[in-house]
Image (tube, grey):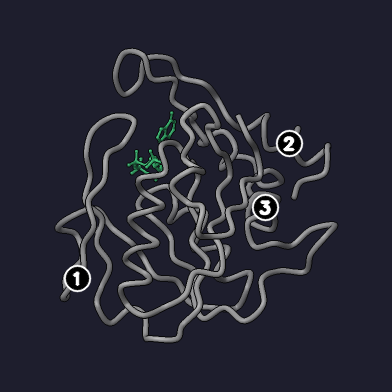
Amino acid sequence: MPTADQRELLLSGIRDVPDWPEPGIVFKDITPLLRNPAAFGAAVDLLAGIGDTGSGYDGLDAVVGIEARGFILGAPVAQRLGVGFVPVRKEGKLPSRTSSASYELEYGRETVEMHRDALSPGDTVLIVDDVLATGGTARATIDLVRGAGAQVAGVSVLMELGFLNGREKLRDVTLTALLSL
Ligand SMILES: O=P(O)(O)OC[C@H]1O[C@H](OP(=O)(O)OP(=O)(O)O)[C@H](O)[C@@H]1O
Ligand SMILES: Nc1ncnc2[nH]cnc12
C-alpha cells in the first residue's frame, strides 16, 4: 500500500472531469499520472505489490489487464513481476476464439472477452485495472478467468470509487485499491 508521500504523488496525477462522458459522472482522468514518470512508476510498483510492506506478488503465471486503461497499467506490472500479460478486451476486438461476459457500467453496458487459450487450468493470475467503480468490469473478468479454470490471486486497482460499492461484488477475491476516493 502507498506511503503518505506516495499517496500524495498518486493523487496529484488524478484529475476530476465533471460531466464526462455524460452529465452527472465525475470522470477520474489518469492521463496526468501517466505523464509523470515518478507517479507512473510508483503506481506500477504498488500495483505489483512492491513497496514498504511487500516485495511483489509471488507464484503468478500472468497479469490480466482490462481494456483500455488496464492495459496501460497491467502490462508494466506484468513486466515488473517477470510474467506474461493477458488482455481482456471489449467485444469484437480479439482475433481468435474467445469467452465473453457482459456487465453494467456507471455509464452504459459492456461485454468483455478473453482468448480461450490465454490461460490454462491451474494458472494463477493478478487482475489489474485503473478504476473500480460499480465492480461490473472486474466481476466479469474474474468470471472469465475462473471459467478458464485459472485462479485469481487478487484484483489490484489504482483507485476505488467507494460510493459505488464495487467491493460488494468482489467479496470472493482479495481486492487491493491503492486509493479510496
Ligand atoms: O467498476 P466498473 O463500473 O465496471 O467500472 C470500471 C471500469 O470502467 C472503466 O473502463 P471503461 O469501460 O470506461 O473503458 P476504458 O478503459 O476503455 O476507458 C475503467 O477503466 C474500468 O475498467
Ligand atoms: N467515474 C469514473 N472515472 C473513470 N473511470 C471510470 N470507470 C467507471 N467510472 C469511472
The crowd level at tag 1 (other Cα within 10 Å; few <14, some 14-19, many 20+) is: some
Corner quadrant of residue 58: bottom right
Residue 12, horizontal then vertical, whole percent: 68, 29
> Mark 1 falls on what kind of element?
strand
In percent of the image, x 49 and y 35: which residue is there? 165
Mark 2–mark 3 distance (CA, rounded to whole Å): 11 Å
> Mark 2 falls on what kind of element?
helix
Residue 108, horizontal then vertical, whole percent: 23, 33
Q: Is residue 157 above or below residue 114?
A: above
> Mark 3 falls on what kind of element?
helix
Residue 129, horizontal then vertical, whole percent: 48, 51
Q: Which residue is mark 2?
A: 9
Between discs 2 and 3, the one toward the N terminus: 2
Residue type (three-letter) at the residue carrying disc 2: Leu
Between discs 2 and 1, the one toward the N terminus: 2
Of the two numbered discs 2 and 1 in the rendering, the one whose residue sits closer to the viewer: 1
Q: Is residue 154 above or below residue 103?
A: below
Corner quadrant of residue 35: top right
User: Given contact means CB atoms under 8 Å apart, are the residues at marks 1 and 3 in contact?
Assistant: no
Of the two numbered discs 1 and 3 in the rendering, the one whose residue sits closer to the viewer: 1
The crowd level at tag 2 (other Cα within 10 Å; few <14, some 14-19, many 20+) is: some
The crowd level at tag 3 (other Cα within 10 Å; few <14, some 14-19, many 20+) is: some
Residue type (three-letter) at the residue carrying disc 1: Thr
Mark 2–mark 1 distance (CA, rounded to whole Å): 38 Å
Q: In this image, 124 relative to 96: left or right?
A: right
In percent of the image, x 60 and y 78: which residue is there? 82
Q: Which residue is mark 1?
A: 98
User: Given contact means CB atoms under 8 Å apart, are the residues at marks 2 and 1 in contact?
Assistant: no
Question: What label does residue 41 carry, if any?
Answer: 3
Residue 85, horizontal then vertical, whole percent: 45, 71
